[in-house]
Image (cartoon, rainbow, N blue to C red):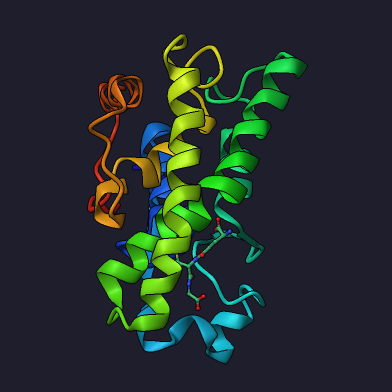
Amino acid sequence: MAENIYTLYDFPDSGNGYKVRLILNHLHLPYRYRAVDILAGESRQADFLALNPNGKIPVLQLADGRCLAESNAILWYLGEDTPLIPADPWQRASVLQWMFFEQYSHEPNIATSRFILKHTEVDEERQRALEQKRPAGYAALDVMERHLNNNTYFVTDFSIADIALFAYTHVAEEGGFSLAGYPGIQRWLAAVRSQPNHCSIDAIG
Ligand SMILES: N[C@@H](CCC(=O)N[C@@H](CS)C(=O)NCC(=O)O)C(=O)O
């Protein structure tokens, strides 16, 4: 039986955490799972801040104790030297391009809207935030749709760019974003789901 060399600190409903669970599954890498209750403030307590001073899950801890935060950095670390990251320099940079897009244009609008709707009481301030995020979230989906009208995946073959963008796109409707007018995104979601070793957001370990 393979040894658990990784410990994943995570919040089960997190799409950022799901990215890491998904790549660990794709690569058949066993891991220990440590749930962090971010709703109860556990990510801001001293023992967790010792792992990630930024107070956010996911954190991947290696057997020697080193900790890596930021979901897309973890994808890069685990994906190196596997078919999930291309060898060609242009394609590698293109993978990064989509992962930076995910963090700057997609996640701050779509993931955070989903968090507000699923995990908070929507008061006036949060309602305003939802309204501000809506056009920016749809603009990100439009960019993806244009690309996916002519491409099966974001960069040539299935890669960590697809994992990064799948995590919150497949649950965009929970954030109030309808995918009905996005046939290219829907085809791509199906292509990602059909990958061997795909797992759902609620699958842990
Ligand atoms: N850029 C980070 C974002 C991580 C993030 O926003 N984590 C949220 C959950 S999805 C969190 O830990 N929130 C708890 C907190 O801020 O205390 C990544 O991609 O890993």
* Residue projecting furthest to the right: 89
Q: Is residue 57 left or right of residue 179?
A: right
Residue 79 lies, in percent from the top left, at 57, 33
**Residue that extends furthest to the bottom in the rendered view of this protein:** 46
In the picture, which quadrant includes the N terminus?
A: top left
Q: Residue at x 38, y 50 (%)?
A: 18
Question: Does 72 sit above or below residue 148?
Answer: below
Residue 3 visible to the viewer: no
Indicate the position of residue 188 as horizontal and vertical percent values: 34, 22
Q: Quadrant of residue 87?
A: top right
Residue at the image position 23 percent from the left and 53 percent from the top: 202
- Vertical position of residue 77 compared to residue 85: above or below: below
With 171 as the anchor, is 58 left or right in this view? right
The residue positioned 56% from the left and 18% from the top of the image is 155
| Side of 188 relative to 9 (left or right) | left
Q: Residue at x 65, y 42 (%)?
A: 100
Viewer can see residue 142:
yes
In the picture, residue 169 is in which quadrant?
A: top left
Q: Is residue 51 above or below residue 159?
A: below
Residue 139 in the image: state x and y as whole percent: 49, 40
Identify whether 82 is placed above or below 90: below
Image position, residue 150 (x, y; %): 46, 9
Is residue 98 found left or right of 18 in the rendered image?
right
Work out which residue is located at the far top of the displayed protein and give it. Answer: 150
In the image, 160 versus 80, the foreground residue is 160
Tell me how many marks there are: 0
